[in-house]
Image: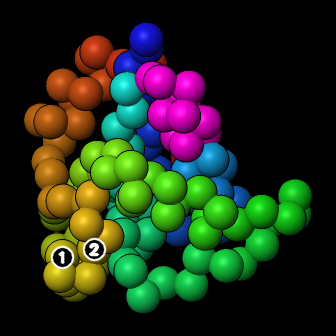
Amino acid sequence: MAKFLFILGKDDNEAATRCFQFARIAHSKGHHVNLFFIDEGVLWADTTRDLGQKTVTGDCPGDYLPYLVQEEVKIGICTPCATNRKMDDARFFPNMQLDGAPHLIDLAAESRVFNF
């Protein structure tokens, strides 16, 4: 199966919904999936965030992210991006951890990359 890397760099409900949806589909088809949140995308790591805001198509991040958490799909959170936004990793979902650019580059080198 293929390796996919989904990068979320926006604090945008529609971008996050599509990122999580495509990651879920790829994972459910048996592909190896990683996600990485950078820039404003790190704000989606917060477990207290409302995931129920609907997109134009009627779905929402909460339709897909719980699957990724339950299936323990690895999600890297850019350390300087989170630190400079005063994000507390104690509020991250359990499948998320602080990570850095060197690992992101390694993941990208061996994966098909989708940017959101």
Quick check: is 85 in the magenta stretch? no
| Majority secondary structure of magenta residues | helix
For image coordinates 40% across by 73% down, the residue present is 43
The residue positioned 28% from the left and 15% from the top of the image is: 110
Task: Please tell me whether mark 1 sits on a helix, a strand or a loop.
Answer: helix
The kind of residue on which mark 1 rests is Asp
Q: Where residue 42 sits: x, y (%)? A: 36, 65
Q: Residues within 10 Å of mark 1 (few under 14, many from 20)?
A: some
Residue type at mark 2: give it. Answer: Phe
Q: Distance between the residues labelled 1 and 2?
A: 5 Å
Q: Is residue 113 visible?
A: no
Task: Provide residue 79's location: percent of width, then percent of height.
Answer: 16, 61
Asked where in the image residue 103 lies, by quadrant, the reply is top left
Residue neighbourhood size for the residue with mark 2, other residues' Cα within 10 Å, grouped as few (<14), some (14–19), many (≥20): some
User: Is residue 27 something that shows in the picture?
Assistant: yes
The span picked out in magenta is 22-31
> Left or right of 43: which side holds 56?
right
Q: Which of 95 and 13 is in front in this view?
A: 95
Q: What is the number of the mark on residue 89?
A: 1
56 left or right of 10 in image = right
From what the image shows, is residue 116 above or below residue 93? above
Which residue is at the front of the view, 41 or 50?
A: 50
Return the residue at label 2.
92
Closer to the camera, 16 or 93?
93
